[in-house]
Amino acid sequence: MPATEPILVAGAWRQATTSRTYRAIDPSTGQDRGAIWPVSRWGDVESALEAATGAARELARLPPEAIAAFLARYADRLERRSAELVAAAHAETGLAVQPRLAEVEMPRTLDQLRQAATAAREGSWRMAMIDTPKNIRAAACGLGPVVVLPPANFPFAYGAVTGGDFAAAIAAGNPVIAKAHEGHPSVSRLAADEALAALRDTGLPAATVQLLHGLEPADGERLVADPRVGATGFTGSQAAGERLFRAASAAGRVIWVEMGSINPVVLLPGALAERGTSIADELTASVTGSAGQFCTKPGVVFLVADAAGLAFLESLAGRFAAIGPQVLLGRSGCDRLVAAIGRLEAGGARLRAGVAAAAGPASHVPVLLEVSGRDLIARPEAVVVEAFGNATVVVACDSLHELHAAVACVHGSLGASLYAARDGRDDAEFTDLVPLLIERAGRIVENRMPTGLGVVPSMQHGGPWPSAGPPFFSAVGFPWTILRFARRVCFDGWTESRLPEIVRDAPPPGRPWRYVDHAWTRG
């Protein structure tokens, strides 16, 4: 077997015990790239688990400033290599260098890591509670080794060793065992090199960050169920996410999954009559930006088929038809998109623009489909189908009553958008639809498409099953997102000097809000 790229285990790059190998592809050409990447046998996983278990105990004894210093140093090191990382990501994903990778995703990634550093240092995520008369205190603490399983579509912001799950897990004081995505392994390899250097720079345990390049599916299920794993963060397809969720849950392990999402967009009649042209532009950009490969892309659009609605649909079809083939992340993603469009057609949707066929090795033209509200209500399982890529379905309803019933057929999503006229003519229907959308999405957007979200503390990026699970927490928004990889620990009757600093009666000035003797106070 030819030499493969090394894996990072216990602070050292070494050869994997390999079950098979793979190459990444350049989706623009369909050609394999040169590097050979290993899919590890269980022995590599076992070594990583043992090293991570030891690292978790060391990290639990370190002050939050040490964790914060690593995250900040790591962000600085990545920033210095950003051009090289962007070039690698472009070559393996086909995503545009400008603006997508260099001006949007890389800055977001660096900002996430720095937000995580601030949150680790500041400590409010720990939700410290102190009952001085009873001498009972509690605070959130790390869970132990965290497994990070990333998606194909965000090589940095959701990357195995750069993304939000990684940053949140580290901020909570957990070591990370990362499994690179096979669509962009060199990005993880380059980033892990900088993570290892940052660990050495800041004195954290060498096994705080470990990287495997591939796992057999059965070993992935075994890993997330292993009792040494504190939690898993997964972002990817619904099929893989459900399989891992079942394996982890059956073993009583914590797993956070972000999976497929339909992200319904409701266009009320007054909004289309008022500004249908601009909404058509927004929807086209939202579905076709980065070839529609966003978890927040609108997958189903609801409107009333009155004069304004029909004119909107006609103009939207023209916009889609005017866009040529777009490069997708890889051959398998293109195949899945073609299959999903085929399912939608079989379910009664008809093509208004585009064709259900690949336009190149990993390319597809934008696709617009239309289905009646009546047909969706009759067979929702045939129409409420995620087509990940540059395709969407417009549901043309005979009335607002039918639109309401059709929206009720949509399952859980990460986001939902509701467009209403600015002059107030849609306000009554807007009010009626909001509770229905809140039941079905974690984030409700007014008069804007669901693509593009702010990476800020107040952001919610999670939703009802099957978009994510459990639905309570968010994959975005420090410090809230850290709590996915933490648990509450009670300190009952402890001597003051032995308590963790966060739950002492008199912490140093500047500590975060704490709940002390039945009232929130600044430490």
Image (cartoon, grey):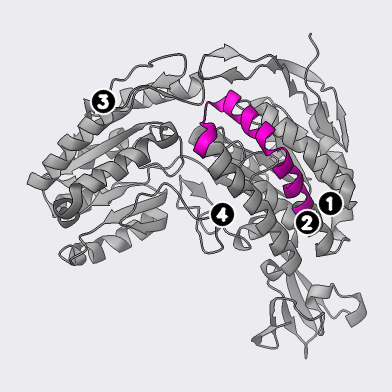
Residue depicted at x 81% and y 13%: 3
Which residue, given by chain and number where applicable, does mark 3 sit on? Answer: 345
Q: In this view, does 444 lie above or below 220?
A: below
Rendered location of residue 221, percent (x, y)? 66, 34
- Name the mark on residue 476: 4
Upstream in sequence: badge 2 or badge 1: 1
Q: In the rendered view, does 465 fall on the left or right side of 341? A: right
Instruction: Kindly report the distance in space between the C-alpha atoms of the residues bearing marks 1 and 4.
Output: 24 Å
Instruction: Kindly report the distance in space between the C-alpha atoms of the residues bearing marks 3 and 1.
Output: 51 Å
Marks 2 and 3: in contact by CB < 8 Å? no
Residue depicted at x 26% and y 60%: 433
Secondary structure state at the residue bearing disc 1: helix
Q: Is-magenta flag for residue 351?
A: no
* Amino acid type for the residue under numbered disc 3: Glu
**What segment carries the magenta color?**
72-99
Instruction: Kindly report the distance in space between the C-alpha atoms of the residues bearing marks 3 and 2.
Output: 48 Å
Q: In which quarter of the image is the N terminus?
A: top right
Q: Is the magenta stretch mostly helix, strand or loop?
A: helix
Q: In the rendered view, does 39 fall on the left or right side of 374? A: right
Which residue, given by chain and number where applicable, does mark 2 sit on? Answer: 173
Answer few, some or many: residues within 10 Å of disc 3's Cα (few below 14, many 20 plus, some between 14 and 19).
some
